[in-house]
Amino acid sequence: MSGGLTVEGLSWSYGAKRALDDVSFRVERGRFCALLGPNGAGKSTLFGLLTRLFVTRQGLSGRGAAARIDAALDRLSMRERAEERAGDLNGGHRRRMEIARALIHRPDVLLLDEPTVGLDAGSRAALVDHVHDLCAQDGLTVLWATHLVDEVRDADRLVVLHRGRIAADGIAG
């Protein structure tokens, strides 16, 4: 597979508690994949393990960094908020700023672990729209963990995680 994300045979335990049990799935490049499951299903454990695999040192400086910052702010309609402290932004703007920060390094895969927690319905819908646009327009592969079914669109890839195992895997619609 060229690009995208492949998870194959992933298991993880916290002592005697099995958090993930032989989890396998693929997300094609440029696709939005919703990882759906109730609290305690293993979504955050999966994200923690994947994050450790993806994080590397990526230093940027000078004009290159400034240009990427400007592009990320423009992409998420956050330029007018660029001088504000992140802690002073409302929840929806703070989440968009966090995504803009993540995009500065031009990742191939974006992992978002319940990014809409605490947002009102309008802010949640706007954030879901922005991230779907990133997939469609930029070819970004997104793994989006949630327990809210209204964040999943009919054409999205859907992986349902329950008690650390894949309960369903396919197209949502």
Image (cartoon, helix red, strand yellow):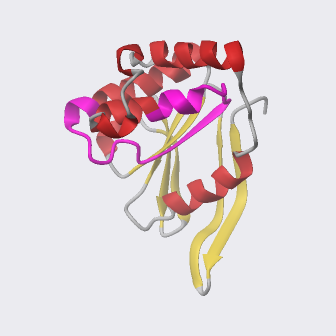
Residue at 65% over, 71% down: 12
The mark total stands at 0
Nearer the observer, 80 or 48: 80
Please give left or right for residue 146 compared with residue 8 in the image.
left
Please give left or right for residue 130 compared with residue 50 in the image.
left
Q: Percent from the top left, x then y, of residue 86? A: 39, 35
Residue at 29% over, 30% down: 125
Q: Is residue 13 above or below residue 107?
A: below
**Is any atom of residue 108 visible in this view?**
yes
Q: Does the magenta stretch include residue 106?
A: yes
Q: Percent from the top left, x then y, of residue 13? A: 63, 76
**Quadrant location of residue 57?**
top right
Q: In this view, does 165 lie above or below 90?
A: below
Nearer the observer, 77 or 132: 77
Quadrant for the C terminus in the image: top left
Q: Percent from the top left, x then y, of residue 101? A: 53, 31
Residue at 21% over, 38% down: 120
Q: Percent from the top left, x then y, of residue 56? A: 75, 44
Please give left or right for residue 69 compared with residue 4 in the image.
left
**Quadrant location of residue 97?**
top left
Residue at 68% over, 29% down: 108
Nearer the observer, 63 or 159: 63
Magenta span covers which residues?
A: 98-123
